[in-house]
Image (cartoon, coloured by chain):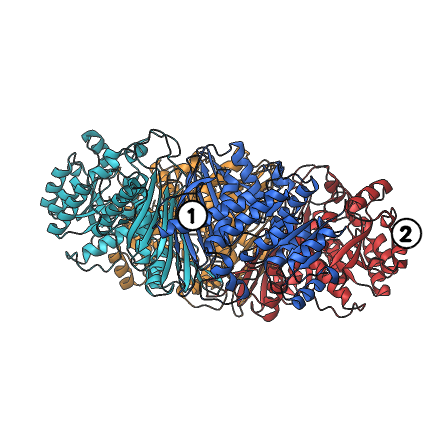
Chain colours: A blue, B cyan, C orange, D red
Amino acid sequence: MRRLRLGMVGGGHGAFIGAVHRYAARLDGEWELVAGALSSDPKRAAASASGLGIVPERSYADFRYMAQAEAMREDGIDAVAIVTPNHMHAGPAVAFLDAGIHVICDKPLAATAEDADAIADAVMRSGRHFVLTHNYTGYPMIRQAREMVANGDLGALRVVQVEYAQDWLTETLSTKQADWRTDPERSGAGGCVGDIGTHAFNLATFVTGAAPESLSAELNTFVAGRRVDDDVQVRLRYKTGARGSLWASQVAVGNENGLRLRVYGDRAGIEWSQETPNSLAFTVFGEPRRILTRAGAGVTSSANVTARTPAGHPEGYLEAFATIYSDAAKLIRAGASNGTRQVPIPSIEDGLAGMRFIASCLRSSMGNGVWVDLGSAAR
Amino acid sequence: MRRLRLGMVGGGHGAFIGAVHRYAARLDGEWELVAGALSSDPKRAAASASGLGIVPERSYADFRYMAQAEAMREDGIDAVAIVTPNHMHAGPAVAFLDAGIHVICDKPLAATAEDADAIADAVMRSGRHFVLTHNYTGYPMIRQAREMVANGDLGALRVVQVEYAQDWLTETLSTKQADWRTDPERSGAGGCVGDIGTHAFNLATFVTGAAPESLSAELNTFVAGRRVDDDVQVRLRYKTGARGSLWASQVAVGNENGLRLRVYGDRAGIEWSQETPNSLAFTVFGEPRRILTRAGAGVTSSANVTARTPAGHPEGYLEAFATIYSDAAKLIRAGASNGTRQVPIPSIEDGLAGMRFIASCLRSSMGNGVWVDLGSAAR
Amino acid sequence: MRRLRLGMVGGGHGAFIGAVHRYAARLDGEWELVAGALSSDPKRAAASASGLGIVPERSYADFRYMAQAEAMREDGIDAVAIVTPNHMHAGPAVAFLDAGIHVICDKPLAATAEDADAIADAVMRSGRHFVLTHNYTGYPMIRQAREMVANGDLGALRVVQVEYAQDWLTETLSTKQADWRTDPERSGAGGCVGDIGTHAFNLATFVTGAAPESLSAELNTFVAGRRVDDDVQVRLRYKTGARGSLWASQVAVGNENGLRLRVYGDRAGIEWSQETPNSLAFTVFGEPRRILTRAGAGVTSSANVTARTPAGHPEGYLEAFATIYSDAAKLIRAGASNGTRQVPIPSIEDGLAGMRFIASCLRSSMGNGVWVDLGSAAR
Amino acid sequence: MRRLRLGMVGGGHGAFIGAVHRYAARLDGEWELVAGALSSDPKRAAASASGLGIVPERSYADFRYMAQAEAMREDGIDAVAIVTPNHMHAGPAVAFLDAGIHVICDKPLAATAEDADAIADAVMRSGRHFVLTHNYTGYPMIRQAREMVANGDLGALRVVQVEYAQDWLTETLSTKQADWRTDPERSGAGGCVGDIGTHAFNLATFVTGAAPESLSAELNTFVAGRRVDDDVQVRLRYKTGARGSLWASQVAVGNENGLRLRVYGDRAGIEWSQETPNSLAFTVFGEPRRILTRAGAGVTSSANVTARTPAGHPEGYLEAFATIYSDAAKLIRAGASNGTRQVPIPSIEDGLAGMRFIASCLRSSMGNGVWVDLGSAAR
């Protein structure tokens, strides 16, 4: 079984998430990076490509040309990873999909609703796979949590508390990462809400299997001069009757990457924190709290499938990200059909839901917290 | 220096909070329980009193009679502790205040706005001290936190996240405690919001020194047949421009008494949890997280004043509660003047603020989360 | 039921453990401090007594006179608390026992084997109760652990790891506390091993119910000029075949009062830490770890008996200490017989075992870690 | 820069550590697995090789033939990974070294002193690199700890407590992993002491930079019928005057992979736990505890060099293992000289030290804990 061939758009020297995608693609040995348009600056693109073992002829300065060239090669790429800033997702995504090449795209889906629609249309007409790297869904204990909810271990869900607290934007910051993520032209109108709020929203949806139907939000900008929000307070109502909050912040001093999820049903509750991802607290009402551990006693099959090491040998962020890549490989190897997903991998639908989440938060916040229906929201 | 003489209304056999008040009164040796109307049932009152070392002649079946009798004794009580259900606060509070006796009253202040007003009026006209046992403010690390905020250690406050999660009302429950706390006739219209939401609200106010000015709330009742709320989601806006959330729940399975506070400023952040109350996480932006400990390195004076044991010898809930009692003793020993409090002890004002909080949450929730001004709210 | 009357020897202004004993005696309302020889300096004694509500005539400058005077009073003390430095335990203990007064004595039992023998003889001939305040045995989760071991929940014990790490003597220190605890004339030949090593030893014995039969020890003194050990490494062999280590240190920087116990059997294991005393980890082999909590789900009766507050309302060091005092009150109220203890309260036997532990550690260490039989050890 | 070519001996279907080595080799993109003698059973070897993308002609059934064949190829392997049981280390190691091929070998070095000597001799005469995968030294916070000790941040070291607690061998177990690890013919005379005790020993040595000079040990076998030790208690004396304990156990129920290190100097102390490897507690005497985090505030350069993700994005076991592989790649790329290591990577010397540790523990334990000099110990 050959390795799948991967191309990459973006991710040249100095990028953060591009390197993460490459670690993720390498870990399980399913992928081989063979082509790239790593930068719009040809020299920079070539230098980056060379350092990554991409042969010169497959280092492209233009993603459109790359899509066409790769589509025509017999050994062309199976999929492309798009790791550019948000406003640069749609262009390459559409180009590669239309060239018949599967797409693995960083989140959020796009900077604008128009871009998001363009990608969705291209997915539909191409029939190619589109994988959105909501990487936190790749954590074994998150899959365990999802399975437990689905199995009814928690009973009927009542309260869902999710939060994502960081502090890196506590002060005005000018770095490559900070610049585009706080620039509405590149990140989209949502700042914190788009960058990490969508992760929290996606995680809650993934685990509960229960899409929120409406929300009330307040977006704040605490750092003077910042053009996007840096703190987000949201209340969510789920179709099932569950209720909950989502808090995302980039100014919560002392938090590095504090994504945490708590779900309570009428029978049991679970609690999970991304910074110690190998355990999941599980409490049945009236019984002592149990600490479930990745690959440990009492965890069920699907979490173990994604575990690479025995219990007590911690897996981390890159392993969870790699699981997304390996799941994408399974999808692709399973055939062209997008219809029947056998792995719970974030898709175009999740991307569109994230766009609706961003738009709804912005609309609610401008309306002083008015409840906005997520289903009907313009993206 | 003699011990102060304490009376008690409520707190007979089987009560929870009455016993807590007695532990708190005894710990520091400032108080002596000498009189009580421990139950409205005379036999039960007498039996309870006897077990507590109260002489028969000072075991009363009627609090009104007790107030008058004690006021006339030369060795009459200095203060009375009111530990009855909420709807039974106002009667005894007014009676004892009007008899010139200081009052230590459990929270929330009252079951209704009318009752609250009656108590406030009696405080005003009597000039007696009124102490509300928002006991969590007695924790040394909470006082440390308050002092750090006041000192500007956190900079300008931005985000305040407070929560109080329990699970004891996950299912329909009929016990002495559960019965009155879920009965709007006795607890007031607020259930969870009054019982523990007010604690969370008070704690955030106490530490930040910044009264919230408006709120948007959603009150939920998840257990079928329950007549009051059992889960509360609130967004708060502070006068200083800070923003934050308050979540209180009695159905969050796996949480015993999870009161937690996180405060973030533009310079530093703090995090505290009631179930491990002897430490306080403190992070200055750009520096490693520091773990401050009760009576440990780096804590300032006021927290140490309330510490009875060296660092590493944990103090708990009863010690924090006892601090309220000892602070009350200081107040009383300092003289009759209610005006100048030298100790940060919860007062009638805190009680009224809690009533406004409950009323505002109810009003906002009925208005689908409309923002309600806390200042102007009818209590 | 009247309060028991307590006297105190030692514990004047500036003392640490005297105040702790007083908090402990007050908390449950079982005791009333009515007499004391709080200091050998009469003025200091009188001043301390006055602040504690002891009437002048019962403030004594001499413990021998106090013993006789109190024994003759109709309202004489029921028991005396001895809270002096180690070398001052035997004198008062013998005097009060011989006067027919029960003794509650701080640990370790004495500074020398001769003193220990003198106390033991006095206990024997007087028939009075002698309670040694190995206070950590009063923690509810320690009692829970003891009961679980006794019930066979852990199976046959294999490994017992106990440690007690502090850092307060990391540097040369001259305070009232440090001075006598590092002076072999006052503390006895053992420093760290006597002060906290005996606590660790006692805790392991208490929980496992399995007395160690031999040990190999290394005592170290890291701070130049110090005349006693400040770090102790011990290996223990239990009669049951279990094996384990004991580590005590006063120079482990970053540890405040880190007493921790881990016990592993062939069926399950438990782990407990004094600084977070309200929980106990319990893992049955092949099952997820469970977190048992004081007064919480799954804890058995004896732990609950000692719990004053509901689960999640943390009890601490003083509550555990108070349980020793209340258990002592039960003993005394139950009658004069020392024979049948219904409460698991540290006794003269525990004190003598601690003395043998200290002596054996010293002997082993001087013999380069030779194994020393605890049973036959000269104290 | 081409990828280095890796071969592997052992690691066929069902092996645990072979897969770990492959993840580690892949993660950073420095290595490509191109050849293997994955099993001594030719069919099994071929099947395993095929699944790993090794072309049939480079799947060998015999490691000796593989060494010669690869040495003769122009595109022959740069290094071989030896992932067989301990008794099968020496044969391949010598064969590949003598063929001029670098060796990356799993720990412990060998099953017998003779084997260890043979490997050491081959390293000497070949001049090739020999890397022992004491993988825990690859954790960023362990490198941080090592650097802090070396910088004098802790002052003069006093106490070193290291432990490695597991529970997987609590009962008699017959699996591929358990079988050879409890068979003295294959694992060597040490069971627990060799399998995980050597890791703990190596970690303490790596961080402190201070080789222990003597030890006193007790090895126990708790499971009936087991032919090797399953619990190890050791006291260590360091050349610098530091003292400490090492505990390793495979029967400590409730522990998955509990490798923990605590080091205390006269100025500060550090504490680390492998199951939450991204943080390191650091306490300067008299200051609050600081929590240093991987890639976070206050960590120094070398730890960041090995960090692949930002703070709060946890790295785990595989990343630490991968760092060993990438460091090996650096060594090899730096030239043939074994003399000047610029990276702190475990070597033949560490392997020999581990063998001396095992032998000394066995000898001490047979001598009832007699102190054994590590320097002079026969391996």
Tell me which residue sits at (39%, 50%) in the image: A363
Q: Is residue A305 at all visible to an observer of this figure?
A: yes
Q: Which is more toward the observer, D378 or B341?
A: B341
User: How many numbered marks, from 0 up?
Assistant: 2
Residue with the mark numbered 2: D65
CA separation in Å, label 1 and label 2: 66 Å
What kind of residue is marked 1? Ser
> What residue is shown at x 50% (from left), y 53% (from top)?
A112
Residue, disc 1: A360
Left or right of B161 on screen, residue D369: right
Q: Secondary structure at mark 2?
A: helix
Q: State whether residue A348 is above or below residue A63.
A: above
Quadrant location of the C terminus of chain B in the rendered image: top left
Foreground tag (1 vs 2): 1
Query: Callout 1: residue from which chain?
Result: A
Estimate the x, y position of residue D92 in percent, counting from the top left. 84, 53
